Image (tube, helix red, strand yellow):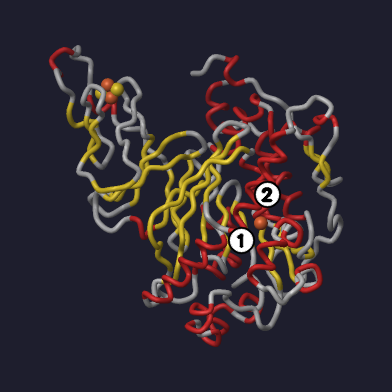
Amino acid sequence: RRPADLVRTVDVSGLVDARGGLLDRAIFTDEQLYRQELRRVFAPSWLFLAHADQFHKPGDFFTTYMGEDPVIVVMDKGRRIRAYLNSCRHRGARVLRADVGATRNFTCTYHGWAYDLDGKLVSVPNREGYPDSFDTDDWGLVEVPNVDSYRGLIFGTWNPDPVGLRESLGDMAWYMDAMFDHDDEGTVVVGGVHKWVLDGNWKLAAEQFATDWYHVNMSHASALMVLSPTKNPKTEIVHRAGRQYVGTNGHGAGFPVHPKNRFNAKTVHEWTDYDALRERLGDARVEGPLTDGHATVFPNFSYLPVIGTIRVWHPKGPDRMEVWSWTVVDKSMPPEVREAQRLYNLRTFGPSGIFEQDDGENWSEVQAISHGFITNTVPLNYQMGLGSEREDGRHPGTTSELYSDAAGRAFYAHWRELMNTPAWHEERNQ
Ligand code: FES
Ligand code: FE
């Protein structure tokens, strides 16, 4: 049971006008709203944990966060992927401090309590000092009750009775398959995880990957000129046709539509069998979301198909996020093709990427001034493409124009709904 003052709640209806396309900046800066967000947005949602390729044998583990809660993701003896709160049941220290590795059990370095791969407390130093009522069965690690995967992407939720992962993705799965289902072999990760810290609220990044093709021409003008020196980005890119998927449950994706959409990295392009992809995924996907595009699975998992990056925007307070990014390639790619994709990813995105630098700069800039009192009385504009949402007959679900805020409005509409809905743990506490 939590004291009542720890679960103060704000009605956010007045802060998000999804229909009118107006947002109040407090949702990016307010500490109390942030606490509510961890409780009502992160705790009940399916959150990305890891890629299946990170686990090959029992004991392989990866430590990450769900919201700000540290978790261990591990393959148990039955080869099932499970996740536990990375906090000792004794005095709360982490039982695993490494980022990644393999282990037989989790031994806390504070007083030495040890847990097995099933999360069971199996060793307590000076056990005889505890009363008879002390039962190790009562003090196992707290387990994430639901873990599931889609196309090698492992998600977990603290919600004990969630809508299933596949169902919560809805039509988003069709768009995800354009990156994660090129053939029967699926995808693998290359190398480790890049991690970096940015000043900026996590939603700025998640929202942009859901909805914002608009910034590309201006923010990335110099990077586009480097990549295509003969093209003028203002004329070449700005007129490209495309669509934006306006998801249910806050998901969103945008992509140019062109019969000759292709992978940008030359080696990857030359290796790719586009006819086979058309056969498997259909023309609409190959000519749309297969290559150039952006996407966010609500709340904080994003990917870029042509770049081969998947990432999580971990919240670290209202003003800060930690970005974790992986390079993902088709398992069927030979080593030189994988390497070409990895290098292309490195050059464009990730901490050294020429595009990533521009994006991070924007988010930090927006955040830096957002605590001002007058600044906060001026709403933000999300009105592009207002009323353009429709079914286009080619892509599933509702779509809008490529240049549109529609998926952003849907992202915040879902956010608002979750923020105004008591989560399962609050109902229990009332
Ligand atoms: Fe883990 Fe004491 S905090 S054994
Ligand atoms: Fe960008």
Within 10 Å of the Cα at label 2, are there few (<14), some (14-19), or many (20+) other Cα atoms?
A: many
Cα–Cα gap, marks 2 and 1? 15 Å
Given residues 200 and 296, the one toward you in this image is 200
Indicate which disc residue 139 carries.
Answer: none
Residue indicated by mark 1: 172
Residue at 38% x, 59% y: name it. Answer: 191
- Most extreme residue toward the bottom is 275
Callout 2 touching callout 1 (CB < 8 Å) = no
The answer to whether 135 appears left or right of 274 in the picture is: left
Residue at 53% x, 46% y: name it. Answer: 323
* Residue 241 visible from this viewpoint: no
Residue at 17% x, 28% y: name it. Answer: 123
Classify mark 2 as within 8 Å of ligand 2 or not, answering yes or no: no
**Which quadrant does ligand 1 occupy?**
top left
The amino acid type found where label 1 is placed reads: Met
For the C terminus, the image quarter is top right
In x, y percent, where is residue 390?
Answer: 80, 64
* Residue 43 visible from this viewpoint: yes
Q: Quadrant of residue 64?
A: top left
Element type where label 1 sits in the image? helix
- Depth-wise, is mark 2 or mark 1 nearer the camera? 2
Indicate which disc residue 207 carries.
Answer: 2
Residue at 72% x, 63% y: name it. Answer: 244
Q: Earlier in the sequence, mark 2 or mark 1?
A: 1
